[in-house]
């Protein structure tokens, strides 16, 4: 019987944690939308220069991968951030580039994971 109570306690703790993380990530999404930004996951760093960082990101809302240029900013692989900017042409590598004007605060990967778990449960219900 004690083991059963322990499992129930853990399940309830996880549910509450995921609800909190879901609310946190929804707040990030709302703030990003208010700025016209979209949340992206930095997949690869192509170049770190004195003047900024060129990277490849995967947009969470579309799943598409884009080259981005973050002038005077440092991006790191695995970061998640709300980004806004404009599309242009990258002369150096002959590819379309998204030029970042705004990079929001880093989003903790655990926050996104908790949001995704809770969102999957909400969809199933």
Image (cartoon, rainbow, N blue to C red):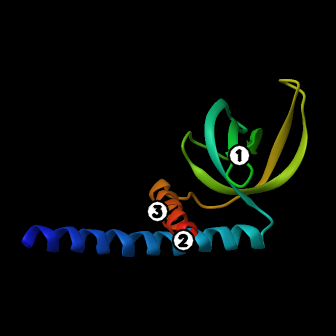
Task: Give the mark nearest the N terminus, 1 or 2.
Answer: 1
Residue topped by disc 3: 114
* Near-viewer residue (105 or 41): 41
**SS state under label 2:** helix
Q: Is residue 100 above or below residue 56?
A: below
Q: Residue furthest top?
A: 93
Q: Nearer the viewer, mark 1 or mark 2?
A: 2
> Residue at point 88% right, 24% down?
94
Label 1: few (<14), some (14–19) or many (≥20) C-alpha neighbours in 10 Å? few
Task: Give the mark nearest the N terminus, 2 or 3.
Answer: 3
- Report if residue 74 is visible in the image: no
Q: Quadrant of residue 85?
A: bottom right
Residue 85 placement, left or right of 45 = right
Residue topped by disc 2: 122
Label 3: few (<14), some (14–19) or many (≥20) C-alpha neighbours in 10 Å? many
Residue 93, image x, y percentages: 83, 23
Whole-angstrom CA distance, mark 2 to mark 3, is 12 Å
> Residue at point 84% right, 38% down?
97
Q: Is residue 113 above or below residue 12?
A: above
**SS state under label 3:** helix
Residue topped by disc 1: 63
Residue 87 placement, left or right of 68 = right
Whole-angstrom CA distance, mark 3 to mark 1, is 19 Å
Label 3–label 1 contact, CB within 8 A: no
Residue 6, image x, y percentages: 16, 70
**SS state under label 1:** loop
Q: Quadrant of residue 58?
A: top right
Whole-angstrom CA distance, mark 1 to mark 2, is 21 Å
Q: Nearer the viewer, mark 2 or mark 3?
A: 2
Residue 110, image x, y percentages: 44, 57
């Amino acid at each position: 019987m004690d083991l059963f109570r322990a499992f129930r306690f853990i399940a309830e703790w996880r549910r509450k944690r995921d609800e909190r993380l879901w609310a946190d990530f929804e707040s990030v999404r709302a703030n990003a939308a208010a700025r016209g930004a979209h949340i992206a996951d930095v997949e690869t760093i192509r170049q770190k220069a004195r003047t900024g960082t060129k990277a490849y990101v995967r947009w969470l809302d579309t799943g598409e991968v884009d080259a981005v240029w973050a002038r005077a900013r440092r991006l790191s692989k695995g970061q998640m951030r709300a980004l806004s900017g404009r599309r242009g042409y990258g002369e150096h590598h002959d590819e379309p580039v998204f030029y970042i004007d705004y990079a929001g605060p880093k989003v903790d990967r655990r926050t996104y994971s908790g949001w995704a778990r809770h969102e999957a449960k909400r969809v199933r219900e």
